[in-house]
Image (spheres, grey):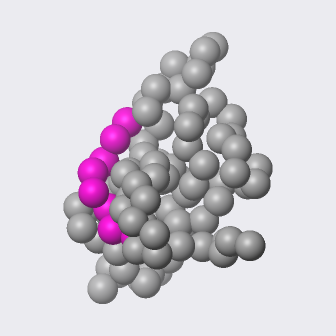
Amino acid sequence: MGTSHAKGLVTEKVGIEAKQPNSATRKCVRVLLRKNGKKITAFVPKDGCLNFLQDNDEVLVAGLGRKGHAVGDIPGVRFKVIAVKGTSLLALYTGKKEKK
């Protein structure tokens, strides 16, 4: 059995086009997982949260919610970013904490 969360390093920021009939660029990052060396694409939730992520930042990723399947209109993306350098992305977004 696998784990629910994984740590990794951000390698690049990418924008992924949404599937039809939606037209948007979903903000995602490419992450190199520490535990097995795989490269995955992870969705960055909330508007403007991509600004908190830089290349080579350590992030914590979790599944998007369909047990290994892509969700909604984002093709091929199965994970979302939860935390950056040990600080919750939501806490950074709301201004309660600052990045370490």
* Residue depicted at 46% across the width and 26% down the height: 17
Q: Quick one: quadrant of the N terminus?
A: bottom right
> Is most of the magenta stretch helix, strand or loop?
strand
Q: Quick one: quadrant of the C terminus?
A: bottom left
Report if residue 89 is visible in the image.
Answer: no
* Residue depicted at 42% across the width and 43% down the height: 27
6 above or below 45? Answer: below
In-image side of 46 versus 31 (left or right): right
Residue 37 in the image: state x and y as whole percent: 39, 66
Of all residues, the one furthest to the left in this rendering is: 55
The stretch drawn in magenta includes residue 12: yes
Residue 56 found in image quarter: bottom left
The magenta stretch is 7-15
Q: Which of 9 and 20 is in front in this view?
A: 9
* Residue depicted at 65% across the width and 41% down the height: 70
Residue 2 found in image quarter: bottom right
Residue 13 in the image: state x and y as whole percent: 30, 48
Report if residue 76 is visible in the image.
Answer: yes
